[in-house]
């Protein structure tokens, strides 16, 4: 007696088909799982045996072999429980093989036969649609699968309910889509008094998706400014929301099938490891850079992060993807995030205030800054000072623009960029100015006659790298978009150069 059930394995965001082949043959009673299973799959036989026993189904006294094909692909996760159980039931003749051939099956089983939610249901459902297949998943994950589109979804709460459905004694209702999460109430930028230069830099960074570094003493408002960035960014469109939530599904952070349209804002602690930041670990899960895809990765107290962690960010920041290398596979996750960082000018934080600075100033400032490598700093487009706020600023009434006004300008600038790049054929979907490079910069950054001499002079004077030159052009393009200008003028180039003055001066 033999049967085959379709399920999946995950390699990054790629969903690979796996066949669960069940063979019951004569011989000494045994239950063996082969095909490079990890520990959680090896334990599946005990969960499956107990679940079937709870239904009154005893395994026959035969040699049961479960093969997970292809055999050279590593498999991990508890979502193989349900396909293994269905494969055994099919091989025993309890369920019809032909009715299960059109389904991807995934789900974890409790000892009493209940179906527990698993990660990766959304990308599996999307792949099922692409292959003209349907999906069987736990009841708690059904609302997640429903977002994939037009497919038949069976989402039982228990193995018994699924058996009854195929026997015709019970009908499983199709699940409904989960709720759309718009996100918490955004913090208002007008709540911050003073710091007009930093607010302007934040607006420019948000409009073009540029990386931003804020430097200033403790209490000057760096973290407050970063926390207001999500309120300035436009919500995710449908395609972007699908990308972001597929990563959340793979990482197990998608709850109750709820889709978020808010751009991610991740702020890991400075004790985060390389694996936590760029991805990896035992199961090569996505890291913070991928969980911040199409959103913001905020690193507070940047020099306090481990040097190795900061250096590991170079490739994701530049390439927009995180590659986790393993002996048996290379897993790639998207990581087109906007890096926003904050730091004090030195360890004590008061380098520019002689009355509060430590005795080692200014040497301590150079040593503290040296904890961040030059190549890493060169990848940051905008460097801005956030000085201490004076008592006069704090006592003055609010005078800055509202979040709604600033967000409106940012939305219009991003709409211009999207319209500009939507017809471009490129390996990566281009959305914002931070995404373009090389030939596209020359094509879309048109300098007027007064801007060219200023840029050439700055390149020679500050010995700018090619990367620095390109990043100045990207920021200048965004500044022109904010005023809805096709040409990039001298004012835009001058402001873009000003945002790199701390890096070039250092």
Image: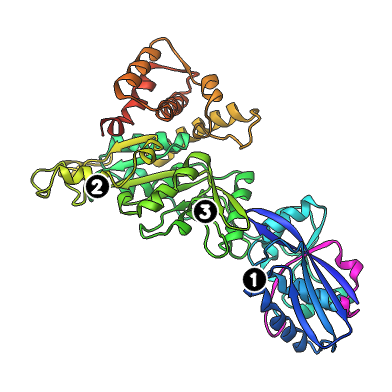
Query: What is the CA distance from the residue labelled 1 to the residue labelled 2?
Result: 44 Å
Q: Which residue is mark 3?
A: 291
Please state the horizontal and vertical placement of residue 52, each as a whole percent of the image.
77, 84
* Few, some or many residues within 10 Å of mark 3 (<14, 14–19, 20+): many
Residue 120 percent coordinates (x, y):
65, 61
Q: Please indicate, yes or no, whether residue 237 appears anywhere in the rendered image.
A: yes
Question: Residue 384 colored magenta?
Answer: no
Residue holding disc 1: 38
Question: In the displayed structure, would residue 338 be above or below residue 259?
Answer: above
Q: Nearer the viewer, residue 270 or 95?
A: 270
Question: Quarter of the image holding residue 352?
Answer: top left
For the residues labelled 1 and 3, the Cα–Cα distance comes to: 25 Å
> What label does residue 368 carry, if any?
2
Q: Quadrant of residue 212?
A: top left
Residue 97 horizontal/vertical position (percent): 90, 70
The quadrant of the rendering that contains the N terminus is bottom right
Point out the frontmost of discs 1 and 3.
1
Q: Secondary structure at mark 3?
A: helix
1 or 3: tag closer to the N-terminus: 1
**Against 281, is 498 above or below?**
above
Q: What residue is at 64 percent from the left and 71 percent from the top?
A: 38
Number of marks in the rendered image:
3
| Magenta segment | 91-113
Q: Nearer the viewer, residue 301 or 411?
A: 301
Q: Nearer the viewer, residue 8 or 222?
A: 8
């Amino acid at each position: 007696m033999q049967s085959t059930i379709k399920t999946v394995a995950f390699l990054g965001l790629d969903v690979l088909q796996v066949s669960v082949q069940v063979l019951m043959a004569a011989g000494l009673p045994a239950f063996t799982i082969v095909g490079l299973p990890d520990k959680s799959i090896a334990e599946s036989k005990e969960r499956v045996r107990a679940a079937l026993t709870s239904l009154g189904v005893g395994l026959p006294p035969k040699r049961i072999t479960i093969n997970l094909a292809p055999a050279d692909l590593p498999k991990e996760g508890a979502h193989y429980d349900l396909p293994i159980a269905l494969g055994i039931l099919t091989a025993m003749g309890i369920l019809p093989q032909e009715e299960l051939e059109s389904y991807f099956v995934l789900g974890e089983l409790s000892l009493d036969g209940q179906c527990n939610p698993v990660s990766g249901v959304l990308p599996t459902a999307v792949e099922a649609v692409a292959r003209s297949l349907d999906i069987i998943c736990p009841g708690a994950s059904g609302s997640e699968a429903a977002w994939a589109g037009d497919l038949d979804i069976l989402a039982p709460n228990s193995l018994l309910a699924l058996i009854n459905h195929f026997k015709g004694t019970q009908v499983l209702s199709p699940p409904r889509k989960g709720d759309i999460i718009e996100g918490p109430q955004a913090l208002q930028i007008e709540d911050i008094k003073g710091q007009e230069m930093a607010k302007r830099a934040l607006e420019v960074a948000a409009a073009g998706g540029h990386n931003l570094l804020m430097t200033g003493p403790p209490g000057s408002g760096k973290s407050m400014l970063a926390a207001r960035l999500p309120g300035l960014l436009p919500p995710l469109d449908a395609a972007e929301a699908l990308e972001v939530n597929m990563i959340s599904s793979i990482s197990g952070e998608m709850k109750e099938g709820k889709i978020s349209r808010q751009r991610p804002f991740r702020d890991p602690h400075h004790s985060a490891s390389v694996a936590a930041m760029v991805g990896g670990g035992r199961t090569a899960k996505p890291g913070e850079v991928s969980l911040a895809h199409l959103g913001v990765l905020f690193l507070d107290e940047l020099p306090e992060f481990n040097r190795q962690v900061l250096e590991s960010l170079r490739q994701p920041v530049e390439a927009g993807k995180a590659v986790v290398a393993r002996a048996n596979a290379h897993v790639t996750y998207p990581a087109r995030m906007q890096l926003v960082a904050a730091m004090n000018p030195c360890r004590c934080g008061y380098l520019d205030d002689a009355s509060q600075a430590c005795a080692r100033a200014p040497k301590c400032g150079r040593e503290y800054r040296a904890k961040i490598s030059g190549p890493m700093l060169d990848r940051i487009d905008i460097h801005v000072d956030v000085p201490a706020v004076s008592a006069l600023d704090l006592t003055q009434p609010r005078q800055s623009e509202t979040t709604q006004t600033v967000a409106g300008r940012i939305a219009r600038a991003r709409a211009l960029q999207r319209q500009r790049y939507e017809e471009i054929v490129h390996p990566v979907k281009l959305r914002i100015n931070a995404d373009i490079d090389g030939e596209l910069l020359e094509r879309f950054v048109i300098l007027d006659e007064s801007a060219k001499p200023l840029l050439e002079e700055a390149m020679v004077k500050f010995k700018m790298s090619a990367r620095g030159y390109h990043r100045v052009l990207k920021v200048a393009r965004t500044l022109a978009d904010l005023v809805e200008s096709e040409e990039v003028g001298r004012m835009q180039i001058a402001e873009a150069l000003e945002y790199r003055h701390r890096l070039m001066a250092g």
